[in-house]
Amino acid sequence: MNKNKVYIETYGCQMNVADSELVMGILSRQGYELTKEIDEADVILINTCSVRDNAEQRIFGRLGNIKKIKDSHSGAVVGILGCMAERLRDDLIKNKNLVDIVVGPDEYRRLPSFIESAIGGVKGIGVKLSRTETYEDIEPYREEGLSAWISVMRGCDKFCAYCVVPFTRGRERSRSLDSIVSEIEKLSVRGFREVTLLGQNVNSYNYEGKDFADLLNAAAKVDRQIRIRFTTSHPQDLSAKLLYAIAENPNVCNYIHLPVQSGSNRILRLMNRNYTIEHYLELIEKARKIIPGVSFSTDIIAGYPTETEEDHQATLDVLKRVEYDGAYMFKYSPREGTKAYKMEDDVPNEIKTRRLNEIIALQQSISLKKNQALIGTEDVVLVEGFSKKSENYLAGKTDANKVVVFPKSEGVVPGDYVNVKITGATSATLFGEFLGKTVLNEFADGISA
Ligand code: SAH
Ligand code: SF4
Ligand code: F3S
């Protein structure tokens, strides 16, 4: 039996986190052991992200360190997985001579044979994309815990003009509904309390006529004490049926990550986002009617090619109008091979930085205001463990994904649902008072007609 030890480090989005668990599932079937110590690894794998240049630069820096570890003592096989593997391909072996194997997101089944060959001194590269691979028969390697990620679809067909993901992840394809349900059943038996369904655009999930609303309904029924989350939703495909599925299932969190990217219709058109701001705002309004109290978060890109002050103001305006509970905010980064790459990156870096800072400052003030408005209200928190700062406090999340910190209480353990009363707030954290243990209520939500 193979007793080689594998160390894996993961960058990028949650889909990469889920993929690393898949990779460990594949390798552990072949007898590999997981190690958390890079120094004792026979195989070092880095699962990478290409979404912005600074993500890649960080990983190149790390690869430099790892090469030193390899050269100075361990002699481990080093492999690069994920989106950079797909984007840079043999450049990573031929020109940079940094690694032994390069394996893209759709070729992980071949990893064991690539590793074997590399141990024998033969470098390897597998970067073919597939129209059908979903790995649905592979059991991911998951440690004990409360929270699990499940990829329900792979790839993206949206081709937003700035984005490298359709090139690194290939075409959209969905996993069977039954395979997802049975994975949640297993997680339920193991005591998991939160499942996040993942895809670049989960709303376009489609398996033999079952859409994402059907999947949510089925996933939520498995265990009503498991919270179901999902990400990411593209505004184009957020149907009324899906909004009702969120509203009708008490354990589907009332929280939608709905990236807007820009507030300017001209920029949205250049981005190939396929919606106008008016359509987007109507959608938010419709969701708020169907799902009372629903929370939203978003992604914003600052300094897209040709962006004017007026376009930037339009983005600030959308933030004020929607009042998101949170946002991920980025400076535009040109990616080779994308449509936007052909446009001049004409917003100077100082201006991008200034605009980004304005966006961040505005969003922080909105988050603070929204959190302060919760003081005095009660909410249900899934307890995750001690707070980061002190073992006298516990921390967990609300349905809207907000962190709540409250004093430790006798008999309360991770995995419990508790009622808390909110007593304080910053832009990032709520503070609360423990009221008592609870369970998720079968009939909590209901729809408002
Ligand atoms: N499928 C998801 C996630 C895509 S990547 C979605 O559509 O939202 C996450 C975020 O990174 C995107 O929403 C976008 O805001 C940002 N992003 C993608 N490409 C980028 C680029 N070239 N420069 C800056 N930000 C980018
Ligand atoms: Fe990229 Fe757009 Fe697909 Fe999201 S929807 S992954 S931003 S191309
Ligand atoms: Fe990055 Fe690839 Fe995810 S580019 S954001 S790891 S899909």
Image (cartoon, helix red, strand yellow):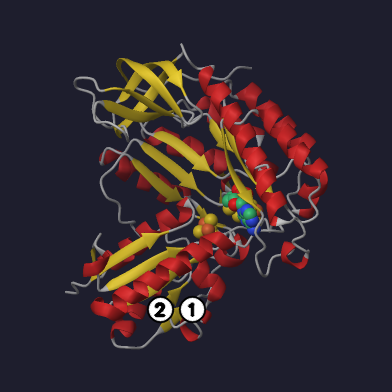
Residue 109 in view of the camera? no
Image spot of residue 421 (x, y percent):
39, 14
In the displayed image of the protein, which residue is found farthest to the bottom? Answer: 121
Place residue 338 in its image quadrant: bottom right
Image spot of residue 305 (x, y percent):
76, 56
Q: Secondary structure at mark 2?
A: loop
In-image side of 279 versus 80 (left or right): right
Image spot of residue 379 (x, y percent):
42, 19
Picture disc at residue 92: 1
Residue 17 in the image: above or below residue 425 = below
Picture disc at residue 253: none
Q: Residue at x 72, y 35 (%)?
A: 316
Earlier sequence position, callout 2 versus callout 1 = 1
Q: Residue at x 42, y 49 (%)?
A: 150
Please say if the residues under marks 2 and 1 sit with CB atoms less than 8 Å apart: yes
Depth check: 421 or 184 in front? Answer: 421
In-image side of 213 versus 382 (left or right): right
Q: Quadrant of ligand 2?
A: bottom right
Depth check: 202 or 210 in front? Answer: 202
- Determine which residue is flagged by label 2: 99
In-image side of 185 versus 90 (left or right): left
Q: Quadrant of the N terminus?
A: bottom left
Question: How many numbered markers are drawn?
Answer: 2
Q: What's the amino acid at mark 1? A: Leu
Q: Residue at x 31, y 32 (%)?
A: 387
